[in-house]
Amino acid sequence: MAFTFAAFCYMLSLVLCAALIFFAIWHIIAFDELRTDFKSPIDQCNPVHARERLRNIERICFLLRKLVLPEYSIHSLFCIMFLCAQEWLTLGLNVPLLFYHFWRYFHCPADSPELAYDPPAVMNADTLSYCQKEAWCKLAFYLLSFFYYLYCMIYTLVSS
Amino acid sequence: MESFLPGPVQNPLMISPHMSDGQGYNSSIPGLYAHQTPTKGSPHPSSGLYNYSGSQNVSPLSNYQGPGQTLNRPPMGPVSMVPLQQGSLPQMPPPSQTSAAVSTSAGSVLPGANLPALSNWQYGQALVSQPTTGSQENHFAHIAGTTSTQPLSSSGNTNPPTSYQYVASPGGPPVQNSYMKPPLGPPPTGCPTSARPFATPAGLPISSAPPHLLNSAMKQEGTTQSPPVPPNSKMGRSVGYSYPTLPPGYQNTSSPGAPGMQSPSLQCTGGPQPFPQPAFGTNHLAASMGGLSLQPEGLRTINLLQERNILPPAPLQAPVPNLHEDIQKLNCNPELFRCTLTNIPQTQALLNKAKLPLGLLLHPFKDLSQLPVVTSSTIVRCRSCRTYINPFVSFLDQRRWKCNLCYRVNDVPEEFMYNPVTRVYGEPHKRPEVQNATIEFMAPSEYMVSYLQLTWFITFDSTIHFYSLQEGLSQPQMLIVSDIEDVFIPMPENLLVNLNENKELIQDLLRTLPQMFTKSLETQSALGPALQAAFKLMSPTGGRITVFQTQLPSVGVGALKSREEPNQKASAKDIHLTPSTDFYKKLALDCSGQQVAVDLFLLSGQYSDLASLGCISRYSAGSVYYYQSYHHRHNPVLVEKLQKELKRYLTRKIGFEAVMRIRCTKGLSIHTFHGNFFVRSTDLLSLPNINPDAGYAVQMSVEESLTDMQVVSFQSALLYTSSKGERRIRVHTMCLPVVTTLNDVYLGADVHAITGLLANMAVDRSVSASLSDARDALVNAVIDSLSAYRASVLSIQQPGLMAPYSLRLFPLHVLALLKQKAFQTGTNTRLDERIFTMCQVKNQPLVYLMLMTHPNLYRVDNLTDEGALNIGDRKIPQPPILQLSVEKLSRDGAYLMDAGSVMLMWIGKNCGHNFISQVLGVPSYASVPQNMTHLAELDTAESVRTIAFISWLREQRPFFPILYIIRDESSLKSSFLQNMIEDRTESALSYYEFLLHIQQQVNK
């Protein structure tokens, strides 16, 4: 039983993974909020509500944009840590997502990444459902990796 | 409570003509005609009905089918407009018979629930009573009606001239509306057996068709289209019917076979009988639509490579959905609402197989000459999906109706039971809401908001100038704010003034404005801060900001840099189609939230980065106008254009604080919207302003397969505040059949709508990916659909490039798109111009978009009055449309190319002296001025004709096309030739080459 660097990595990633799970859940809720206006149809047509709704959309999009970098960087941190700890299997499991994140970040539809999740673009049923699906997949992935990290942490702690 | 004005009409009166009508129809059709014409002028309810409907009914000639029952008798409408038919026709049936009919019908209405089932029977019976010849006559009437109504319809106060045939024919004079009573009563001639079901509904399912279906079934007397349905089958299913798959000739000849269906018992037991069905169906279709793509010819496959003259000489009409005739007559005008596929594929798999885009094109706020307006305290809507009651719902019985979008059964409110038009209680299915696919509801008065019409002016260079127009001032006072980093508004209460109260000061200001800055040496433009200031001023009230900009904004927030490379040889890759800053987009969203729309007039000689500036209008639902190389002195033609368009801009209708929602039958889902708006929740478009010149497009997918559905419906509801402060809802509903085979999907393809939708998608693609991507996608759309057609529909593989008749113009239109300014490559299109064209693609209604894409070419040196339209006292010649190929030009002719926003008249070198002197007013070809832009009104027949034709073309559109008269040496000749889409240009394929390219890909 030894407290190796690998064990430390797993412990840290366990904590951060919880954060990522939280992010994913938040994304799901946010996209759902964007998709449906929970007001009654009559209220939806009210100009006053329009203002609130628009502000709401902008706020959500603003937060979504704010969360992009933290999420991606946390995940990249995992990869770097596992690389350093020479945990090849774990790294291999994470690399696809890492590349996906790179692609997402640099392949933004608009000119600058600043415009990712900009309200007019995101308020498209297609985009929204894509984002929604993405968020669900990520949630599943993070949840699985959470338990995987837990297992690995214990395993490294016990085995060495 | 209903606020319908009671018309001068008496109910008995209203019913009787109708009834006599129904009867006349059965006994002898001509009787009907004879009767009709007198009704028009007679003390009949004609105007009565329309009064109730409020303000917008300008003329009796409706775009809109009046309440539908009338429509059962197609000949009626046209006939009453066609004088020539009157004389020869027999007398109307005696009144005694009439009243008898009335009573029967009344009796038959009340049993309610059972009604729908009748149609089957009725229909069987009808066949008996209706001789084949009768229906034939119908067709003639139809055609005659159509052609002759065209002229009427294009007169200023009636239908727009572009009205589609199908509109013209069913849209009868309001007289029709008086015939609100559906011909429910069994016609006297009917055999008793067939009438029986009225009384004995047992065994007939309740899931019945809406009552108007019933009527429609009646109509079928002459034109049996749906197969006789056995009593135990669902009535609703008879709504649509499948296309006849027989060759046209066969179908037509098979019509005499109909008598075989005479016995009602045969009808009931026979089950679906495909054979007799096509007989009348197609026959009628062919006759009534003459020239439309669904005529028997529609079943044909065309080898595009062999079809040299593919362009029809008259404008292409929208295909008519293959619906039961009476439903079709209630259907929405295709100018307002149309679908790319008039036959909706049942499953997404089928749609994917067809490789055609599914979507809707809307022109929801189009100026209508006639629009029923309902003022009622209860607006009947589905309780679960909030759909407005519409002609395509079904009434289960008198008290319940079934939503056609979500299939929920709703109660009919008490108030709705009373029909204010006929003043009869217990006829909810005859209310105008259920008789008109396009209708406007007026929200009750408590929802009214009083609006102050306020006006203000701001000018800006590197500073911002506000104008105080406070009462009591002898002249406007200018307040200059030079701090553009943090704009504050001086004396806001004095800036916003009431237009009417301060007219003089405002006029004064407008007069002095042009002189005020003539000596200014300032070249900076602080557009961003000025917009912010304007937004601050407007945000409490909402409204409209009109921006006139002449250069690139250079200081303050939102300053832009020139991104255009001089002489950019459109290397499709790096053109800047995306905004360089999101300032304008963000501001537009703020505006949208505060119900402010920003309209942009860009009057610029140099690059102004419309890609960035345009965002301000795009997301706030404004419009963009662009006048390239505008100069108030050097370019007088553009000045005139601006003047005309600004006038239209200021005088057109406007709706404030609008939202639009598009609903569709469960199973279909809308996923992408195109146009100028902001999507507030996935199906709700936020439109701070709505104007009559804006078009929208949506893309759809089939989410759940539409099994068990015969038809699907779409409803767009536009809620807005009119300039009088009334809250109104304009509702359009469209109903389309569902089909299960690929062949049917292709048959119903609407090539204009498809091209329009593809253009919209291509704009998105050019912005999100690249221009070359978008171009490839366009070409692939043709290749994919044609190869899918070849692979799955054609049984025999023929050489050549086979296309279904409905898609015969598809390659041509796509080629036209590729050569259009928005998507062309290899030529020196200025960036702003390209982006402006893209804005137009997104925001123009389909009609103008098609004109812009594929201009119309006419020969104008030999205009005759033959086939001319009569509008008022004017005669508008109707020359045939020529193909866009130099091959069609001759040196001794003069040709007019109408490209929507510009018109080019090319004078051939050997053009007849007659034309040159009589129309152009110059002695010889050589003396035609280099830049001639006006035709002088000469006192000659030729001149009158030409000018009438040109001004008629101009009147049809909200913008003002400049007319350039060009001859061989003119500099504009190149742009004339560039529009010759079928010809080869240095960088683009000719039509034939394009076809060969496609063939190559398809046959791979």
Image: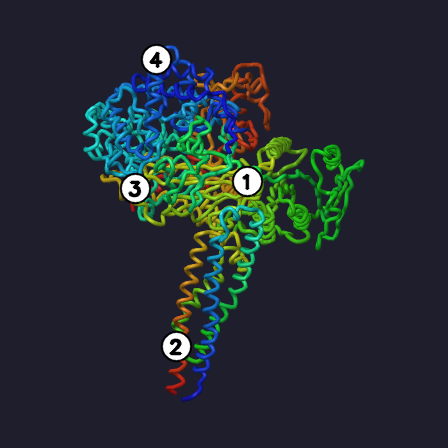
Instruction: Name which quarter of the figure residue B192 lies in.
Output: top left
Q: Does dot 3 land on a helix, a strand or a loop?
A: helix
Q: Amino acid at mark 1?
A: Tyr
Q: Residues within 10 Å of mark 3 (few under 14, many from 20)?
A: many
Q: Are marks 4 and 3 in contact (CB under 8 Å)?
A: no
List the residue tagged with mark 2.
Answer: A88
Type of residue at label 4? Answer: Pro
- Residue at mark 1 to residue at mark 4: CA–CA distance: 49 Å
Q: Kindly identify which residue carries mark 1.
A: B720
Mark 4, secondary structure of its residue: loop
Helix, strand or loop under label 2: helix
User: Which mark sits nearer the N-terminus, 1 or 4?
Assistant: 4
3D distance between C-alphas at marks 3 and 2: 51 Å
Q: Nearer the viewer, mark 2 or mark 4?
A: 4
The alpha-carbon separation of the residues under discs 1 and 3 comes to 43 Å
Residue matched to label 4: B94
Q: Which residue is mark 3?
A: B789
Secondary structure, mark 1, is strand
Q: Position of residue A145 (x, y in %)?
A: 40, 72
Mark 2 and mark 4: Cα distance apart in space = 97 Å
Badge 2: chain ID:
A
Q: Chain of mark 4?
A: B
Choose mark 1 or mark 2, whichever is in front: 1
Q: Nearer the viewer, mark 1 or mark 3?
A: 1
- Which one is in front, A1 or B412? B412
Report the side of B734 relative to B256 (left or right): right
Q: Residue at x 45, y 69 (%)?
A: A21
